[in-house]
Image (tube, rainbow, N blue to C red):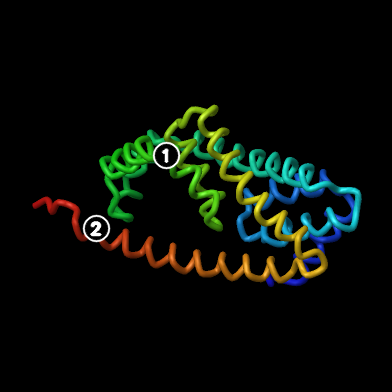
Amino acid sequence: MRGTCVQSIILTLMEKYGYPGIFFLIAVENIFPPIPSEVILTFGGFLTTSTGLGIFGVILFSTLGSLAGAIVLYGVGRILSKERLMRLAAGRMGKILCLKPADVESADAWFRRKGTKTVFFCRFIPVVRSLISIPAGMSRMELPAFFLYTTAGSVIWNAVLICLGAALGESWEKIAYLAGEYSHIMIIVLSISAVSGILWFYGNRPKHS
């Protein structure tokens, strides 16, 4: 389980404010990935067994929170824009990072081809589930499609953890712990994959004399 102080604040907010508290915490979790969504969702499921909160309501407000957080990062991506990144790549920063405008163009083209599926499946991957909204904004992914795939992925992720939390009741922390371990493993796997991808990318770029 992550920091007990953070967890204590999360649980207090949820118990005191109910649905609005869940909405707020999930929205913040989507913007600041280190906040543990597994604690919020599994405890939210438990609350449906001991308070007036219902499973449908917790799923609804957590999903709305996911969308609220995602649209903020989507907006960040729109502000960054592919054009700004290409200008950076063409200047001193690009030389420092060994990045060229063509590299940005290639990454953008890839996201445009695979973006819809990527936005959906990344909702099940810790940290990436939040950050994927930025390239979606940068690539000007159409908002209806962004909302559709973000909502679909969020509903599944949220519903599974909420229902498990409700099923285990007072033992909800077991699910939160297992989900936390899953998050750690996925972060390690993604870190290794990212490093491997970067090495492959730079190793296979055409050499210019």
Q: Residue furthest front?
A: 167
Against 85, residue 180 (above or below) is: below
Left or right, 84 with reference to 57: left
Q: Camera-side residue: 129 or 151?
A: 151
Residue at the spot x=78%, y=49% of the render? 22
Residue 207 in percent (x, y) is at 13, 54
Residue at the spot x=90%, y=53% of the render? 51
Is residue 87 visible to the viewer in this orientation of the structure? no
Q: Camera-side residue: 175 or 133?
A: 175
Residue at the spot x=24%, y=58% of the render? 202
Against 110, residue 28 (above or below) is: below
Q: Which mark is residue 202?
A: 2
User: Badge 2: few (under 14), some or many (20 or more) residues near its Cα, within 10 Å?
Assistant: few
Residue 105 in percent (x, y) is at 30, 38
The image quadrant of residue 177 is: bottom right
User: Badge 1: few (under 14), some or many (20 or more) residues near its Cα, within 10 Å?
Assistant: many
Q: Disc 1 marks which residue?
A: 115
Residue 97 in percent (x, y) is at 33, 55
**Three-letter amino acid code at disc 1?**
Gly
Against 205, residue 110 (above or below) is: above
Count of marks overlaid on the render: 2
Left or right, 15 with reference to 114: right
Q: CA–CA distance between discs 2 and 1?
A: 23 Å
**Three-letter amino acid code at disc 2?**
Tyr
Quarter of the rendering occupied by the N terminus: bottom right
Tag 1 or tag 2, which sits nearer the N-term? 1
SS type, badge 1: helix
Residue 186 in percent (x, y) is at 50, 64
The image quadrant of residue 174 is: bottom right
